[in-house]
Amino acid sequence: MNRFFRWFLAPVFLLAFSAVAWSQGAPTGLALSNDEPIQIESDKFELDDNQSLGVFTGNVSVVQGEMSLRAARMQVHYNNENGGSNNGNGGSVAAGGGQIEKIELDGGVYLSSGDQEATGDAGTFDMNTEVLVLTGEEVVLTEGDNVVVGCRLTVQMATGQATLESCKDQKTNRVRMLLNPRSQDQ
């Protein structure tokens, strides 16, 4: 499963976070695997440079090639200090500056790439620590016929280590996994 987390979740979340990164480049160690155009759509976008916050709300959709992300809301917290920009224009997002510090997704999160999908109620990505967290009543990861279910997925992007925790407040109180041996042949 480590390959699954590293190959699928990292690029998909990086797609979403790089898509809203107004800076000239993502932090070291976080780069997209290709240079296809990124399309972001939402019902509304609000930018508050004073609060260093950009908010996409309503049917948020981020697409690049075959990778996509959907959520009800996506908040982008960025560093708005002078000198925080990669391009010398200060920290203003409107000027193309500002380093993203954290992304928050909520209202149902859906990620997909090819035959791989991940769903949860909410997600966060801390750009400084390179830690991704997907949470929900059920966090479901699928690849073909293989399914893994828990309630909290934590991925250390720098190392590729991932932990899926059980749902402590539910009857099962266990991480559930269904692996289809035939899926290895595909």
Image (tube, rainbow, N blue to C red):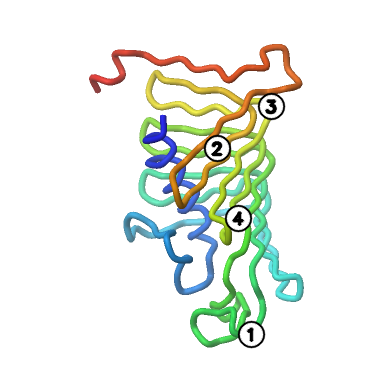
**At label 2, which amino acid type do we have?**
Tyr
Nearest-to-viewer mark from 3 and 4? 4
Q: Is residue 180 above or below residue 32?
A: above
Residue under the point 76% across and 21% down = 169
**Mark 1 or 2: the one toward you:** 1
User: Mark 1 and mark 2: span between their CA atoms?
Assistant: 35 Å
Q: Amino acid at mark 3?
A: Glu
Q: Is 125 situated left or right of 157 in this image?
A: right
Earlier-in-chain disc, 1 versus 4: 1
What's the residue at 44%, 65% (across, down)?
Answer: 28
Q: Count residues near mark 2 (Cα–Cα under 10 Å), then give few for <14, some for 14-19, many for 20+.
A: many
Estimate the x, y position of residue 73 in percent, counting from the top left: 67, 49
Q: Position of residue 44 (x, y in %)?
A: 67, 57
- The answer for how far apart the CA atoms under marks 4 and 2 are is 19 Å
Residue 110: mark in rendering: 2
Please provide percent x and percent y for residue 87: 49, 83
Q: Residues within 10 Å of mark 4 (few under 14, many from 20)?
A: some
Kindly identify which residue carries mark 3.
Answer: 137
For mark 4, give the secondary structure: strand
Q: Within 10 Å of the Cα at label 1, are there few (<14), some (14-19), or many (20+) other Cα atoms?
A: few
Q: CA distance from mark 3 to mark 4?
A: 22 Å
* SS for dot 1: loop
Is 131 or 41 nearer to us in this picture? 131
Q: Which numbered mark, 2 or 3, is in the foreground of this view?
A: 3
Residue at image mark 4: 126
Secondary structure of the residue carrying numbered label 2: strand
The image quadrant where one finds the C terminus is: top left
Q: CA distance from mark 1 to mark 4?
A: 21 Å
Q: Quadrant of residue 127?
A: bottom right
